[in-house]
Amino acid sequence: MTHSDFSGSRLLSPLAEPVQVSWQSPSNIALVKYWGKTGQQLPLNPSLSMTLSEAYTETILSALPRETEGPVELGFWFEGLPHASFGNRMTKFLETVTEIFPWLQQVNLKLETHNTFPHSAGIASSASAFSALALCLCSLDAVLCGILLDEDEFRFKASYIARLGSGSACRSVYPGFTVWGAARAVPGFSDLAAVPVTEVHRDFKSLKDTIIIVSRNEKPVSSSDGHKRMKGHPFAEARIKQAVNNTAELLEAIKTGDKQTFIRIVENEAFTLHALMMTSEDGFMLMQPETVRIISRIQELRKETGLDICFTLDAGPNIHLLYFADQSEQVRKLIVEELLKNNEQNLRIDDYCGSGPVKIT
Ligand code: DP6
């Protein structure tokens, strides 16, 4: 499948009045990590994530009448204020999808977004932002050009578009658990867009994720730069194999409710991500001393208490603590009394496995 399979229509006559659509779309946390890309935003390895609930972006996209056709014209508003640097990234992205949405060059666009979570809090804002925008584009396409798709086609197309903006965003268009990337061991998955995981054990449907903030400073190396360092990485081939196996094993654990396998793989993936960063050319480290203290304590507490807790890390120092609903009272107590004790930020965000994006009417 290529861009041209999604080629869309132009407006037959100039837009007479503004048309507006709006979506809320959540962030997601990767359990098997996407790290390294090739071609046009294609992943080197499969990844598996959980869509969050409380951490989401709300986006309003308006198409406004325009007199002459030309390059994409976008006004971008973030948290109620114009924002030039985010706006430039969004404009660049829109320019890459004009073949799919030719009408983008026939209207003026206004994009207004708002996040429910603080910036640089260890929550992937590009995932929620680009998935919300992709969903808005597909909805506007339906209104302006009458492109009608069934629900599965609509989501797949939105996921394909979101991927072009930010890889991890393609996983946010679905609820629950999602896989992106053609895992050889598992048929039905694609590098072009994510697909939902359909077999989920009931214990996993209410999985919790508390994000423990260690630092809110800008990261010294962005994810986009990090991905580039997988090119020629001495461990790349082994990493791809490991991610394929971890995806297959994690899918089975999520299906059967095997918590011990889940914990083993999720922590193995978090350590692997950071080990790949450290062992790349121009190696770098995003963990901080407080990150190491907290993840070590989580592993000790698991042994001491027998609770089914584990951690994962994104490309940053903040910690995602994962646990199950039936143990959440005990775990929340440990978070306050043990993990956040003496932590300078003393800041956490309680989230959980979410039900996916919502269209606002
Ligand atoms: C470590 O999706 O932010 O969070 O495709 O360049 O936008 P771009 O990168 P991005 O990378 C996310 C990397 C990760 C792991 C993951 O979410 O799978």
Image (cartoon, grey):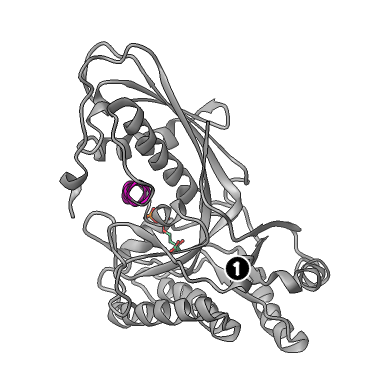
Q: Residue at x 66, y 83 (%)?
A: 299
Q: Residue furthest front?
A: 150
Q: Position of residue 277 (x, y in %)?
A: 42, 71
Note whether 302 is above or below 339 in the view shown.
below
Placement of 72 over or under 277, stated as above or below: above
- Identify the element where label 1 is drawn: loop
Q: Is residue 107 magenta-colored? A: no
Q: Is residue 75 left or right of residue 331?
A: left
The residue lying toward the viewer, choosing from 273 and 101, is 101
Say if residue 254 shows up in the picture: yes
Could you tell me residue 130's position as x and y percent? 42, 44
Residue for point 67% across, 77% down: 309
Of the 4 image quadrants, the one containing the N terminus is bottom left
Foreground residue among 194 and 209: 194
Tell whether position 161 is magenta.
Answer: yes
Q: Can you say whether 336 is above or below 140 in the image?
A: below
Residue beneath label 1, please? Answer: 288
Question: At label 1, which amino acid type do we have?
Answer: Gln
Q: Is residue 72 visible?
A: no
Residue at the spot x=76%, y=58% of the render?
346
Residue 80 % position (x, y): 57, 27
Q: Residue 123, position in %: x, y?
A: 56, 54
Side of 275 where 91 appears, left or right: left
Q: Is mark 1 within 8 Å of ligand 1?
A: no
Give the magenta-colored segment's residue range: 153-163
